[in-house]
Amino acid sequence: EVYGRNASWAKSIQGLADQVLSEVTNIFQRAGELAVSMSNEHYNADDRSAAADEVTELRNQLVILSNTDLGGRHIFSGDAFDTAAFDSAGTYQGSTDIPETLVADDQWVEVGFDGSVAFQGSVDSFQILSDLKTALETNVVADVQSAITSTRDASKQAISVRQEMGHQYAKADDAELLAGNLRAEFTTHLDSVVGANEGEVYMQLQQARSSYSAALQVAAGGLGMNLFDHI
């Protein structure tokens, strides 16, 4: 029961993080579109100033997304989840330590993320938008053109982090499915305890639990087989 609940909770957090990073990708797609269009000589300083206002709004959205919480738990603050991950300047306030939850004997999955990696790993997502805003406000076309590559890099970073989170989600999903199967096994064993030897029943339950952990280890190893064959 506990393992199943933990796995379900982990999936909720990981699923929310995936949605957030999808929105982050959309933000940088739009920022890139603005950079491309405003690099065109047909646009003037007033046009770029108006575009800068939109980039400001995109950056504000990015800060809000980076501070996403689930029930008051900030998912990108590491294990400092009571604290918002980033301030308005884009400074990381969370922890680089990653919280985990137990989903089987000696099997853990992540239930939080290091925002400094997700948003400022290979590139600083906040700074990229700030630089684009400045380039548009100052009407420096060369700097606007440079932002085209930067916004693509930020988008790639978000996609890469999403892929890593996908592995954690799959692990939690396997754990939840296996826990449900184990629960059914327990129910079957309990239904047959009438008149059974207590020691034998205990051994059967322990064997089922061990099978669950073994199956989850196989899942973590990425082997392409039916996990339920182990129970």
Image (cartoon, rainbow, N blue to C red):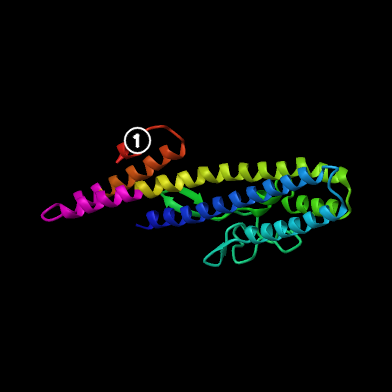
Question: From the image, which quarter does the C terminus lie in?
Answer: top left
| Above or below: residue 230 compared with residue 6 | above
Q: From where the camera sits, is residue 122 visible?
A: no
Whether the magenta-drawn stretch holds residue 193 is answered as: yes
View extreme (top): residue: 224
Residue type at mark 1: give it. Asn
Q: Can you tell which quarter of the image residue 76 is in?
A: bottom right
Question: From the image, which quarter does the N terminus lie in?
Answer: bottom left
Q: Foreground: 64 or 202?
A: 64
Query: Residue drawn at (50%, 52%), measured in percent from left and top?
Result: 15
Q: Can you tell which quarter of the image residue 96 is in?
A: bottom right
* Residue behind mark 1: 226
Q: Foreground: 110 or 126?
A: 126
Which stretch is magenta? 179-204
Query: Residue drawn at (84%, 44%), measured in percent from left and top?
Result: 42
Query: Residue drawn at (77%, 59%), measured in percent from left and top?
Result: 53
Whether the magenta-drawn stretch holds residue 202 is answered as: yes
